[in-house]
Amino acid sequence: MKVPSQPSGTAGETDGPEDRLRRFVTIWSRAIFPVTATSLTRAEFEGHLLPLARLLSGALLARPFDTAPAQRAGAGLVGAHCTDPDALGRSLGVVDSYLVLYCGTDPGLATEELRARCARLQHAMATGYAQALRERTRAEQEAIARSALCARSAAEIALHATESRFRAVFDGAAIGIGIADLDGRIVEVNDTMTRMFGGVEAHVRSRNVSEWVHPEDGPHVWRLYEELVRGEREQYRVEKPYYRGDGTVLWTNLTVSLLRDAQGLPQYQLALMEDITERRLLHLRLRYEATHDALTGLPNRTLFFERLEKALAPAAGGEESGFGLCYLDLDGFKAINDSLGHSVGDRLLVEVADRLQACATGPGEMVARLGGDEFVALTSGTGGDRDATGLADRILAALAAPIGVDGRELTVRGSLGVVEGPAGERTAAEVLRSADITMYRAKSAGGNRFELADPEADARAITRHGLTTALPTALERGEFFIEYQPLVHLDDGSVHGAEALVRWSHPQHGVLGPDRFIPLAEDTGLIVPLGRWVLQEAVRQARAWQLDDPAAGTPLRINVNLSPTQLHHPRLVADTVDVLERSGLAPGALCLEVTESALIGADEDLLKPLRQLAEMGVDIALDDFGTGYSNLANLRRLPVSVLKLDRSFTRGMQQHPVDPVDLKIVEGIVSLAHSLELAVTVEGVETAAQAERLREIGCDTAQGWYYARPGAPDRIHSLVLADAV
């Protein structure tokens, strides 16, 4: 079929939606007006097509997606007398070529999704067209049937006149008509039915209705037939296939009516047949395109979910059944796509699909492509018929061999999440989510492996996702608060300052420590506004302490943690200066803590903002010192004034006897720090013996549960001085 060429200009550049829609209608009318039996002018005909085009355009972009408007559009074509056999094919061609081009203007929908929707709309449009045409044909059939009945009845009174009328209707009908007796023997057929069965009348007239059994006949077809010949029903309609004489299949819409004699007793069967073979083939083609991946030919997400839901449904008769699902994501595929191009990537995906299909050839097994480089393999059955781990092993083995593309040997590996269990316990969405989570666990473990689903790991991942999505609004709703842990001088036990520790008062999970949400904030970029808020609140509190006790000789210092992301933020220095100026706190009362691991291999660009802050008088503390394996010589080039010794070095000092190796290490670090004019703060002090030993070594300040746990700002001087272990 030839579709009219596209008008000049690019759709959507300057025209509004209504203009693009009318251009689409113009193309549509050019395609089907020549084959439409109508007295309308071309402009009037476009007026009939415009509301149908609006239905298709609205359905293409609708959320949620619904194909019902497309069915109404197909029915509308029949209403506009577009019943020529070529009208539907040309209309589907126009929709396939131009609907997305002129009406797919929603930026929220990807082109691939719009094309998939368009295919389903074509399917629905063909279905609506077929239904409307069938209803119209049925009306004609019933009229013919009534004419036939009248003609047969009138034949008893005026045989000659009625016979000519009946023969005119019978022979001239555009649908197949056949008459059989109650035993099923065919006694009369018209030329149309003869042509439908291959053109040889003997192939039809010599048959018995009972011989026309087809493997795809539903069990209800012959039950309806038996009821009709017994006189228990007057008519039935079914979609029924027949074998022609050459072995091909004829699909029909069949209407069978019962003809009674003058006494009302069953006498004959009247069969009316409409040939729907081409329409059914079109339906199957559209169905295939809507349920299969265009690149690999594998079932797509739509068909996969249909099979998965069927596998998860409880087996009939109470028999125990189950399922196994392998969720595959290729390792390193993006690098291949980016470096060698999408054409190479596509050929690689086709080869991977072929290998996966070869792995899932058993009963109840299937492979589908969900999109991109994500595939799923499903196995279902009863008892020992399913083996998801065995299927996963076969998939990994199939991917092990290199794949040749354009003379290159490409190595591709995969990470698989495997979920299996009994049917009837989980929904398809829950199973796929569990498989997805498990696949990412396999990828995090290094890839080229499979992991089995773990309900506890799933719950943790779901909780993590929930916290991630709740983070932005949590800051807006004021769900974060700060607790302060005192920093104590080891020589006299006085409070030197405090470290600000942020907490999240979550509505469902209660109070969460920073280890639960700071990594999530880092991943989402929320750490920058959250860190700025913590800095503002901590500095404001430090200034409040100063104002509450103006007679104090040395103001309390406040320590605030900086994340690696904040270190790279271009407004770090400007934001810090702004916070200090707004609060009135002197720079010397602020200490910013940076983890040692964040400064390993740091270049001058990263150190520059820290140097600027240090030159202003802000102290920079190297947090968790000793865990980052940094070169001690680098301490000379870092703009730090405080070392915070990690608690792992001093944990052995909580009780006697002290490990002499730990003691020597700490003494060496303290000596080195003091020689570089750096103060030493120790974290995790939990006993008096530990505090005393650290004081003897020469550490400057300490914090830990021995002194106080993190708490409200008014408890900054409420020291416990009690062993915490």
Image (cartoon, helix red, strand yellow):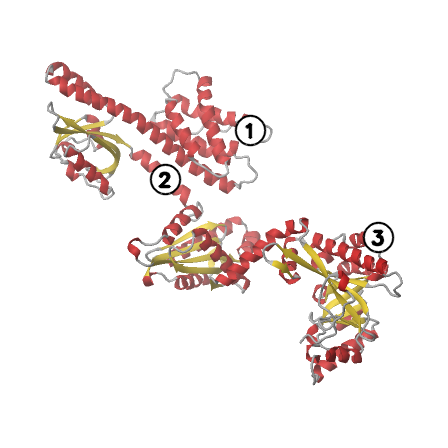
First along the sequence among labels 1 and 2:
1
First along the sequence among labels 3 and 1:
1
Q: Which mark is residue 17?
A: 1
Label 2, residues with CA under 10 Å away: few <14, some 14-19, many ≥20: few
State the separation of the CA atoms marked 1 and 2: 31 Å
First along the sequence among labels 2 and 3:
2
Position of residue 169 in the picture relative to residue 414 (left or right): left
Residue type beneath disc 2: Arg
State the separation of the CA atoms marked 3 and 1: 53 Å
Mark toward the viewer: 3 or 1: 3
Corner quadrant of residue 615: bottom right
Q: Which mark is residue 697?
A: none
Do tag 2 and tag 3 residues touch (Cβ < 8 Å)? no
Position of residue 273 in the picture relative to residue 468 (left or right): left
Residue 34 spot, x, y in % from top left: 39, 21
Residue 703 spot, x, y in % from top left: 74, 70
Position of residue 553 in the picture relative to residue 316 (left or right): right
Q: Nearer the viewer, residue 402 or 600?
A: 600
For image coordinates 24% across by 42% down, the residue present is 218
Mark toward the viewer: 1 or 2: 1
Do tag 1 and tag 2 residues touch (Cβ < 8 Å)? no
Label 3, residues with CA under 10 Å away: few <14, some 14-19, many ≥20: few
Q: Nearer the viewer, residue 687 or 251?
A: 687
Q: Nearer the viewer, residue 197 or 536?
A: 536
Q: Which mark is residue 285?
A: 2
Mark toward the viewer: 2 or 3: 3
Q: Which residue is mark 3?
A: 581
Where is the C terminus found, in terms of image quarters?
Answer: bottom right
Residue type beneath disc 3: Glu
Reply above or below: 681 against 89.
Answer: below
For mark 2, give the secondary structure: helix
Residue 263 spot, x, y in % from top left: 10, 24
